[in-house]
């Protein structure tokens, strides 16, 4: 990565083994930077950015890495074509291409697996696909409302908030503001 970045009177450090865990947590790092640091330290680089950051902070402070988060095991059979409205969603069903094709056929080309539908399929064991279609239609008003952006999507959150404050702002201005924001220590 490039040299240190200036921000709010402090200099953003270059990610390296000389950092402390606390210092690592004070700054915004890209996944690329964190992965490179993990390779240098011999820390597993898999998993999400938040988990990798926790492992790196622990390693930099000389602590054992935190235990990995339990992963949900996908068990059970997956639906295969052909399916219809009476088809029952099995335990562990994923948002598959078979389901997508069914929902596009029943709902129309505007169908997509949004958070409401992903959750419904994941927790819908025993329900029918007709019930899932009804759920899609029942959740459209809530789906159109702005939803919080997850903490792992800091860049997306920043851009949404920046554009709300600067409705006529250009993308280049937003990206410059993002670079300035991430060059500063966190709160």
Image (cartoon, rainbow, N blue to C red):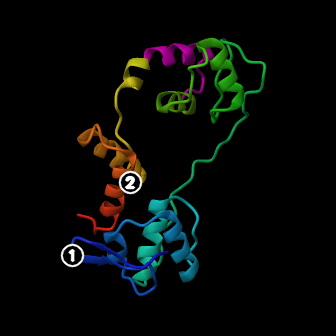
Q: Quadrant of the C terminus?
A: bottom left
How far across and down, in percent of the image, does residue 107 sit? Answer: 59, 14
> Which of the two residues, 146 or 44, is positioned nearer the viewer here?
146
Report if residue 63 is visible in the image. Answer: no
**What label sits on residue 175 in the rendered view?**
2
Q: Is residue 136 visible?
A: yes
- Frontmost of labels 1 and 2 is 2
Q: Give me the residue at 44% from left, 15% from top.
A: 138
Tag 2: Cα neighbours inside 10 Å, few (<14), some, or many (≥20)?
some
What's drawn in magenta, residue-wise?
Answer: 123-139
Sequence-first disc among 1 and 2: 1
User: Could you say where residue 120 lies in the image, as x and y percent from the top left?
Assistant: 52, 27
* Horizontal side, residue 161 vs residue 171: left or right: left
Q: Position of residue 167 (x, y in %)?
A: 28, 37
Q: Say if 21 sits above or below 121 in the image.
A: below
Give above or below for 4 relative to 121: below
Which label is found at residue 112? none
> Would you place residue 122 above or below residue 62 in this image?
above
Q: Are marks 1 and 2 in contact (CB under 8 Å)?
A: no
Q: Is residue 158 left or right of residue 72?
A: left
Q: Is residue 132 magenta?
A: yes
Residue at 60% x, 22% y is 126
| For residue 134, side relative to residue 170 (left or right) | right
Residue 74 locus on image (x, y percent): 65, 43
Q: Which residue is mark 1?
A: 9
């Amino acid at each position: 990565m490039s040299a240190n970045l200036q921000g709010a009177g402090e200099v953003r450090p270059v990610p390296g083994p000389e950092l402390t865990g606390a210092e690592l947590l004070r700054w915004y790092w890209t996944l690329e930077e964190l992965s490179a640091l993990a390779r240098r330290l011999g820390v597993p680089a898999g998993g999400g950015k938040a988990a990798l950051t926790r492992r790196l902070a622990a390693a930099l402070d000389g602590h054992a890495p935190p235990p990995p988060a339990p992963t949900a095991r996908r068990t059970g059979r997956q639906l295969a074509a052909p399916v219809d409205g009476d088809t029952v969603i099995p335990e562990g069903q994923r948002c598959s291409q078979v389901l997508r094709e069914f929902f596009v056929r029943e709902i129309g080309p505007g169908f997509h697996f949004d958070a409401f539908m992903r959750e419904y399929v994941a927790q819908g064991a025993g329900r029918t696909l007709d019930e899932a279609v009804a759920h899609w239609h029942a959740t459209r008003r809530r789906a159109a409302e702005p939803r919080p952006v997850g903490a792992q999507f800091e860049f997306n959150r920043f851009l949404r908030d920046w554009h709300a404050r600067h409705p006529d702002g250009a993308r280049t201005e937003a990206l410059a503001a993002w670079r300035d924001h991430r060059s500063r220590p966190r709160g």
